[in-house]
Amino acid sequence: MVTVGLVTNPTSGHGRARSHIKKIVQRLRDNHLTVIDATADSYESTHRAAHALARQGVSALVTVGGDGMVHLGVDSVAGTNVPLGIIPLGTGNDVSRHFAIPTSVNQAVDLIATALRYPDDYIATSDVIETTRPDGTPLDLGHQFSMAIVSAGIDASINARANAMRWPRQSGRYVRAVMEELPQIHSYGYTITTDHSTFTGKAIVVSAANTRYFGGGMDIVPHADPTDGYLDLIRIDPVPPLEALRVFPQLFKGGHINHPAVHCERTRQVLIEYAPGPDVARPWAHPPLPYSDGEALADLPLLIRSCPQGVRVITPRKDSGNVN
């Protein structure tokens, strides 16, 4: 018997997940899969149920929703042999975009069923991000492992603003959030320690990436490869507001990478801390609460590292480390 665990956020995509769930369950059953619904009444209780299913040995854990549900799913299956299936019905869907998961519900369900019949062709191994306190202490339940990007600058503020919006639909919320954040852009104080160097100074964007997309399709790290064992650290220096208005739209096509204010570094781990600066009377601004996969994590300091081959993912093609 082939059994899949199912987890969903009924509010994903303004209720689209809820409206599709019966159809999804029926189509899974039509593909001769037994479905166990692990969805509970809160993120924490759903995570506990999903985590338990993964350790009971279901054939796959399937998330229905956006990147936040992928975040929950990755944290549940990381370190196990249970593959993650993704049915993208959220706002950003940046993880599914990287792995070229079909946006059609029926196609996404059929891909999962096919992958469980032919795992060698459709189940890929991917790195994941592990985020802890500097001494290795885990964060709150459900936020140790991530798939996409840990954001710790204005990129995190954009995520928080987009999450609070109810209009427009889908990725348009991120575009609106960018336009509302840029006129009041702040630079923040950091000490950033990588495998190779330590930076202390101001920045407006600090992102540690495993996959390439953020904010509903911003191609923030076009060269990101979640099979290379490294994170791609992106830091953008402070720029005037008018220059920021010119640079940020380029994020949607990856055109920002060659800008002189943009710094890229490959590293196996990065420690991000708040730095108040040299002037005690006028300290540098404290960075916003970091986000990953659309979910709030915990305040700095954070130790972020790549966990090579930490999760198995159902994809349309097994070699999907850098899908265009």
Image (tube, helix red, strand yellow):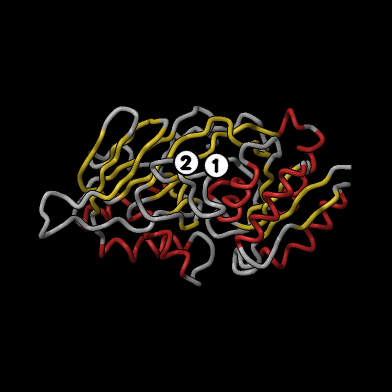
Query: Nearest the camera: 151 or 92?
Result: 151
The label on residue 58 is none
Q: Residue at x 46, y 54 (%)?
A: 297
- Give the residue pinned by disc 2: 212
Q: Residue at x 60, y 42 (%)?
A: 100
Alpha carbon distance from label 2 to label 1: 7 Å
Whether 80 is drawn above or below 279: the answer is: above
In the rendered image, residue 153, in percent from the top left (x then y), is placed at 33, 53
Q: Secondary structure at mark 1?
A: helix
The image quarter containing residue 241 is bottom left
Using a 10 Å C-alpha cutoff, classify the residue at mark 1 as few (fewer than 14 neighbours), some (14 to 19) or many (20 or more): many
The image quarter containing residue 323 is top right
In the rendered image, residue 83, in percent from the top left (x then y), is placed at 69, 39
As shown in the figure, which amino acid type bears the numbered disc 1? His
User: Number of marks in the image?
Assistant: 2
As shown in the figure, which amino acid type bears the numbered disc 2? Arg
Residue lying furthest bottom in this view?
A: 166
Q: Is residue 280 left or right of residue 130?
A: left
CB of mark 2 within 8 Å of CB of mark 1? yes
Q: Secondary structure at mark 2?
A: loop
Using a 10 Å C-alpha cutoff, classify the residue at mark 2 as few (fewer than 14 neighbours), some (14 to 19) or many (20 or more): many
The image quarter containing residue 179 is bottom left
Q: Residue at x 29, y 37 (%)?
A: 263
Q: Residue at x 52, y 47 (%)?
A: 144
Q: Is residue 283 left or right of residue 101?
A: left
Whether 155 is drawn above or below 313: the answer is: below
- Give the residue pinned by disc 1: 98
Q: Is residue 118 left or right of residue 180?
A: right
In the rendered image, residue 291, in percent from the top left (x then y), is placed at 44, 54
Q: Which is nearer the N-term, disc 2 or disc 1?
A: 1
Whether 182 is drawn above or below 259: the answer is: below
